[in-house]
Image (cartoon, rainbow, N blue to C red):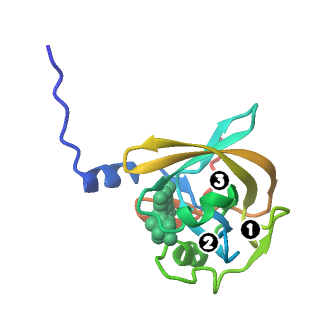
Amino acid sequence: MTMSSQTIEPRHFRDVMGHLPTGVVVVAGREVGTGKPAGLIVGTFQSLSLDPALVTFSVARTSSSWPKIRPAEYFSASVLADGQNDVCRALSSKTDDKFAAVDWHESADGTPKISGAHAWIDCRTVQELEGGDHVIVIAEVLRLDSGGGQPLVFHRGKLGGYRTLQL
Ligand SMILES: Cc1cc2nc3c(=O)[nH]c(=O)nc-3n(C[C@H](O)[C@H](O)[C@H](O)COP(=O)(O)O)c2cc1C
């Protein structure tokens, strides 16, 4: 007996997967040559391995910012805090100077970290894998730190806060 599968329509796929809440993470580095900050928002950032300490995220092949960051290998991931909606809007836009109105400072590697973020992870890319219309990036963790407050959360196409569950 063969099992039939549903035809997966992209909008439906996106809508159903949007029910899985994610954090909102800025992946940012320096453009080789100009040294200008470049970055994008990802909801796919997660830990991959404890020992060695590795993280992963996926980036669309259409991204214009990732090709600017990747040659330098080093980048910082900033986990946005509740209330940093404007940072999310600015860095998920397709404008030229995304960082103009964003408050950031440098990591030890010179990569841009978003000021006031919930956590920061400084990384170096070690591998890129094929992932359909995305590239799966695997990076080693060089150093990391956390800030205070609560995370910004993305759920069903909307940005919101995180309500602590009483367990
Ligand atoms: C909450 C949220 C999560 C996102 N997650 C991803 C992601 O995991 N990978 C990705 O490639 N784009 C993701 N995007 C879209 C990019 O941030 C957006 O396409 C951005 O404009 C890409 O810019 P670029 O062309 O400058 O690289 C996400 C956007 C938002 C708002």
The answer for how far apart the CA atoms under marks 1 and 3 are is: 26 Å
The picture places residue 125, in percent across and down from the top left corner, at: 66, 49
Q: What's the residue at 49%, 82% (across, down)?
A: 95
Q: Secondary structure at mark 1?
A: strand
Q: Is residue 80 visible?
A: no
Q: Spot the residue most to the front.
A: 33
Q: Which mark is residue 38?
A: 2
Give the residue type at disc 2.
Ala
Residue 147, quarter of picture: bottom right
Amino acid type, mark 3: Thr
Does label 1 or label 3 sit earlier along the sequence? 1
Left or right of residue 162, residue 9 in this image: left
Q: Nearer the viewer, mark 3 or mark 2?
A: 2
Q: Position of residue 90 (x, y in %)?
A: 55, 78
Q: Which residue is mark 3?
A: 164
Amino acid type, label 1 = Lys
Residue 131 visible (yes or no): yes
Left or right position of 119 against 55: right
Q: Which mark is residue 113?
A: 1
Q: Earlier in the sequence, mark 3 or mark 2?
A: 2
